[in-house]
Amino acid sequence: MTPLLTSAAARAHVTSADLLAGHDTLVVVAPHPDDETLGCGALLHEADAAGMQCRVICMTDGSASHPESRRWPRERLADLRRAELESALSLLASHAELHWLGYPDCGLPTPNEDPSCSRALEALVPEGALVLSAWSGDPHIDHQMTADLVSSALHHRRGVRRLAYPIWGRFERGPAPAGMTVVGSAPEVREIKRRALGQHASQMTRLIDDDPGGFVMSDDVQAHFVDHPEIFHAEA
């Protein structure tokens, strides 16, 4: 196992109620459609089931996953990925608000390039919220930029707690982040997460079959995110 997964495996699990305690709103900031499910789908489901206000902010349109597809040009793929996200949320958190920012996949601005993005994020985060966003240590530019934008938006907000969720960084050989919280979930919740992940068929199956180099998440990686506990930690 990688250092991050080894460290996570050594930690006692907490419940979703433990992590959500003291917060009125859960805000999930996802770089792409599917990151909300991969990173924190179980926690999002349990927050919604408990009656918390939930908001999901999707930063990009996810349209760069199959760049050579002729049947699925970027505009059409973006529409599909939004529909997949809506379908996943109908299973995970049917009462959640979806905020689709729609930046081009792999085209997020820096906070200085587009200050309006950070302002939009800040406006969607009420006092007392728990904010879960992508980790700056993930080896993907959109995950890193999402972390920077959320940090820029919320660095001065003392009544907001922000945690990161690692996606691709789980599988890196670098040092594990400090202060991880590991949240377990019941089998029935993991099954809902599995079904929600399946709604992202453009990423999880060969639905788009005219781009051999296009992204498809392998079955074993999908199983990892469903079967393993969700991991959160504070950003440095």
Image: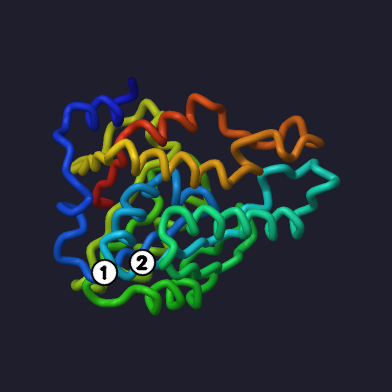
Q: Is residue 12 above or below residue 76?
A: above
Residue placed most toward the observer, 153 or 29:
29
Which numbered tag is attached to residue 16? none
In this view, which residue lies farthest toward the front? 188
Label 2 element class? strand
- Mark 1 secondary-structure assignment: strand
Q: Position of residue 50 (x, y in %)?
A: 26, 61
Name the amino acid, label 1: Ala
Q: Residue 172 appears at what percent x and percent y?
A: 40, 29
Residue that numbered label 1 is attached to: 129
Task: Please name the residue that numbered disc 2 is placed on.
Answer: 54
Q: Relative to residue 57, is residue 165 depicted above or below?
A: above
Q: Which of the 4 image quadrants contains residue 92? A: bottom left
Q: Residue at x 74, y 40 (%)?
A: 208
At horizontal 18% and vertical 46% (from top left) the residue drawn is 15
Relative placement, left or right, of 92 versus 43 is right
Q: Residues within 10 Å of mark 1 (few under 14, many from 20)?
A: many
Q: Amino acid at mark 2?
A: Cys
In the rendering, at what x and y percent does residue 28 appear? Answer: 39, 60
Q: Which mark sits nearer the N-terminus, 1 or 2?
A: 2
Side of 86 relative to 214 (left or right):
left
